[in-house]
Amino acid sequence: MSTAPFVSVTWTDPETGRQGYLVVDRLVRGVCSGGLRMRAGCTLDEVTGLARGMSRKEALHYDPAARYVPLGGAKGGIDCDPRDPEAYPLLVRYLRAMRPYIESMWTTGEDLGLTQELVDRAAAEAGLVSSIQALYPLLDDESEARQRLADAFAVSVDGIGLDALVGGCGVAEAALTALDRAGVPALGTRAAIQGLGTMGGATARFLAQAGVRVVAVSDVKGTIANPEGLDVEALLRARDSFGTVDRAALHPEDRELPGDAWLETEAELLVPAAVSYAVDAAAVGRISPACRWIAEAANMPVLPEAEQLLAARGVTVLPDVVANSGTNAWWWWTLFGDVGPDAEQAFGYLRRSMRRLVGDVLDLAAAQGSTPRDAAHALAAGRMPEINERFGWYR
């Protein structure tokens, strides 16, 4: 894969001077896919790395027998705190500025700091038909496909939208697959999760439902810990839209700790589900010797030098391009018609796909003596030529 992206755009907001970015890593059939994030400190380098990761995620879910045809990879980013009063008007102006790309090639949606509802509302205000309208010409029946996706977004499971659950279901299934292959039962395995937003919250729910004991979660206010296990459902009910938990909902035995305390929790599984670059080389020394797996629910949370140190300790990092790829895949499975607007069907299809993909990655990593990330990148690179041959790409 070329290191130079197909398109790289830096936009400066004329009203605030804040910057936004769009990077299109590659196109397939003239279209690419990748979410839009908003966070203070977002950079072009960050968005470039995320776009490259999206190309790999798309390729890893290629199934010649499926209706879903993988797209190219892209990513958008805005350097602003999503809680800032200027955040929403800034989002509208960014989408208006990116309108030519969204109309012609870039399909986007929620990511860190932004919900799908917010993206949809801002896209409409910016004059767009939809944040994924560039894909519509590739559909066999646009009207039917759009209705199917709308119906899927209307599905709720125990008070949480299906769209907010599929990503965490995929992360949990990736982790559970790794446990199964190591012969470690989920029941009694301990997990600590950084972030209780869309991805972290859903991951916590599905891990807890599988019997994993979630012993720590963190948000912007700090870490909530209980070595006997947290009441995950109570915490999810007490979250605001940014994933911050109302401390009034805590049980008496729950402890409030500093924000980075999740990292050193006695747990076999760590799930960074918030910002990128959360685990650097210095952080590795703080991770408990009990840790055996890290499942990357966030994008790019473990830095390369940290991953090398973790591998030397025998810690397996399940990379973001695999572990957190479920949301993106579910969108397209639904739109293309591989799954319908049904929660059980979606979860079943996603679990089977993740188990197969994680198995392939871990098998290749063992065979070539590499990390799972290197194996995932090799698998993606091996699938891209077939995708290019069958569907064409523009570079």
Image (cartoon, rainbow, N blue to C red):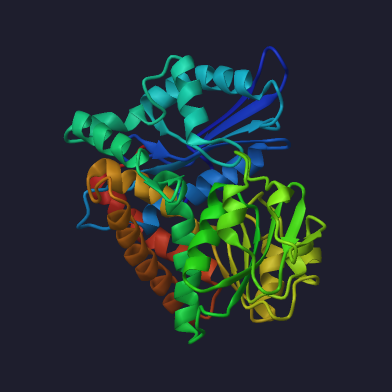
Residue at 61%, 62% in the rendered image: 231
- Residue 106 in view of the camera: yes
Picture quadrant where residue 102 is located: top left
Place of residue 204 in the rendered image (x, y in percent of width and height, measured from the top left): 55, 61
Residue at 77%, 48% in the rendered image: 221
Residue at 59%, 42% in the rendered image: 112
- Residue 298 in view of the camera: no
Q: Out of 84 and 295, give the one closest to the viewer.
A: 84
Q: How many marks?
A: 0
Q: Is residue 181 above or below residue 109?
A: below
Residue found farthest to the left:
140
Residue found farthest to the bottom:
183
Asked if residue 325 lies left or right of residue 134, the reply is right
Q: Is residue 167 above or below residue 335?
A: below
Residue at 48%, 23% in the rendered image: 121
Residue found farthest to the front:
252
Place of residue 38 in the rendered image (x, y in percent of width and height, measured from the top left): 62, 34
Q: Quadrant of the C terminus?
A: top left
Place of residue 164 in the rendered image (x, y in percent of width and height, measured from the top left): 47, 46
Place of residue 226 in the rendered image (x, y in percent of width and height, measured from the top left): 71, 68
